[in-house]
Image (cartoon, rainbow, N blue to C red):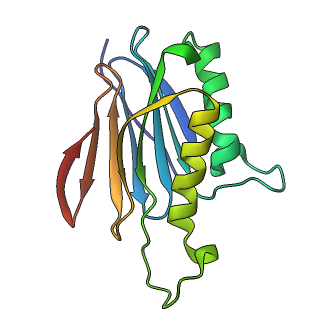
Amino acid sequence: MDKQEHRVKMAEYAISSSPDVLITIGLGSCVGIALYDKRTKIGGLVHIMLPQNKKNLKPAKYADTGIPYMIEKMEKNGAKKRRMVAKIAGGAQMFSMGGEDSGLKVGERNVIKVKEVLKEENIDIVGEDVGKNYGRTMKFYTDSGKVLITSHRKDDNIL
């Protein structure tokens, strides 16, 4: 089977299986969450933009609805939640706001909510590259579960 690359845009998700690669770019304050079932080699990647879905809008845009939504879709494709692990990246503070108003720290709030949701779902985070003040690209290899993080301001990081 030929390896295919699938792009995951902001507020979207994708599910695929080995040997495909899932890619999301432009992770500033957004967070990319890669979920992986090692046994079936089924992976999912969601690119969330905000922590909470208060108006029941597009589920993949928000941490509190995007992660459970992707878990459900992965299980329909043969993955088991009890075997899933997570790797997360992004959640940067891209702009200095000149104050300590936590309401403006979207990246930090995204990371906190992602971790809360994963804990509620009993999914361990086995790798993370979050925070700081630079953007990231996330490349998720479903054949191995490896996640490559690239940035123009930092050396590559393998999760």
| Residue at 63% over, 58% down | 50
Is 120 situated left or right of 6 in this image? Answer: right
**Residue farthest along the bottom direction in this orientation:** 98
| Residue at 64% over, 23% down | 73
Q: Is residue 90 visible?
A: yes
Q: In which quadrant of the rendered image does the N terminus lie? A: top left
Q: Can residue 10 be seen in this view?
A: no
Q: In which quarter of the image is residue 158?
A: top left
Viewer-side residue, 52 vs 43: 52
Q: State the image coordinates of residue 65 (x, y, percent, origin top left).
A: 70, 42
Q: State the image coordinates of residue 79 (x, y, percent, origin top left).
A: 54, 13
**Residue farthest along the right direction in this orientation:** 55
Q: In this view, does 84 lie above or below 56?
A: above
Viewer-side residue, 25 vs 118: 118
Q: In which quarter of the image is residue 40?
A: top left
Q: Is residue 75 above or below residue 127?
A: above
| Residue at 34% over, 57% down | 136
